[in-house]
Amino acid sequence: MATQRTRRAPQALKGTVVRTERLTPSMYRIVLGGPGLKEFSAGEWTDHYIKLFFPRPGVSYPEPFDMQRIREEFPREQWPVSRTYTVRRWDADAGELTVDFVVHGTEGVAGPWAAAARPGDVIDFAGPGGAYAPAPDADWHLLAGDEAALPAIAAALEGMPDGAVVRAFVEVAGPEEEHPGVGPVEWVHRGGRRVGEALVEAVRSMDLPDGVPHAFVHGEAGFVKDLRRWLRVDQAVPRERLSVSGYWRLGHDEDGWQASKTEWNAEVEAEQEKTA
């Protein structure tokens, strides 16, 4: 059976930038280390994620960093900005945590921080959470997503059972955004089209392997909704064989998207029940 989600209280940790790398024109890799990661552990899931906390300009927070204390003692407008990112890799022996960031120029909070990060910079974060790992008993595996989901897809490919049948699709802006060393992946180039449009076409037109898949579909909420409907209704994939989530939504920052995500999930589920 597919692995099931477990929850645990996130722990507050502090990472120190060890090194940085620009993987593609829009993807930056940050490797965190230092004594603040002593209590960190990951490996159960391939979609482990952490919540990074970015301080408000001009605001200093007490040490050790404690979000609960901050929420109790600081006005809301001074709370740190939180952003969620996938753990690309955790090297327990080296004590190094790798996180990949999509950077759109000066837009947003986390992207500009990653682009400007230098060894010695520190960042507070909480985690990890996680929910998905490739099920060893699946007939085949479907992985589909955009740049935001690429780190989790790459980790899932590395965590596949021996001999697994895998179809992986990743939509990126163009060939310059393909990641060498990540595979096997069918790269889908967006060009000037809406995010996810080309990806949905590629996934829906593939030759389906025999049997029931274990599917991981994450990224922009619009295409995620389309592929979730296709998997649940058209392909009759059981709900427990799906890991499907909107990481972000066009026209929303993470705060706005998270505020509306519960309602969005309920609408999608209701729509699929009507058409099933």
Image: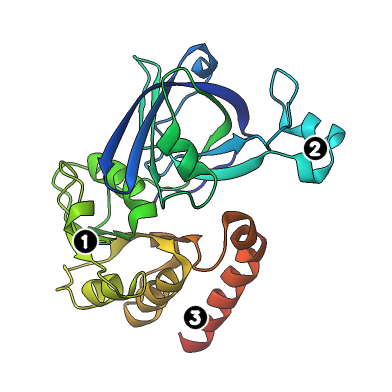
Under circle 2, the secondary element is helix
The quarter of the picture where residue 252 lies is bottom right
Q: Amino acid at mark 3?
A: Gln
Q: Is residue 107 above or below residue 224?
A: above
Specify the quadrant that holds the C terminus. bottom left
Q: CA distance from mark 1 to mark 2?
A: 42 Å
Classify mark 1: residues with Cα within 10 Å, few (<14), some (14-19) or many (20+).
few
- For disc 3, the marked residue is 272
Q: Is residue 193 above or below residue 135?
A: below
Residue 260 seen by the camera: yes
Q: CA distance from mark 2 to mark 3?
A: 38 Å
Classify mark 3: residues with Cα within 10 Å, few (<14), some (14-19) or many (20+).
some
Looking at the image, is mark 1 or mark 3 earlier in the sequence? Answer: 1
- For disc 1, the marked residue is 174
Tell me what residue is drawn at x 21 percent, y 61 percent.
174
- For disc 2, the marked residue is 71
Q: Is residue 45 above or below residue 217?
A: above
Under circle 1, the secondary element is loop
Looking at the image, is mark 1 or mark 2 earlier in the sequence? Answer: 2
Looking at the image, is mark 2 or mark 3 earlier in the sequence? Answer: 2
For residue 202, side relative to residue 152 (left or right): left
Q: Amino acid at mark 1?
A: Gly
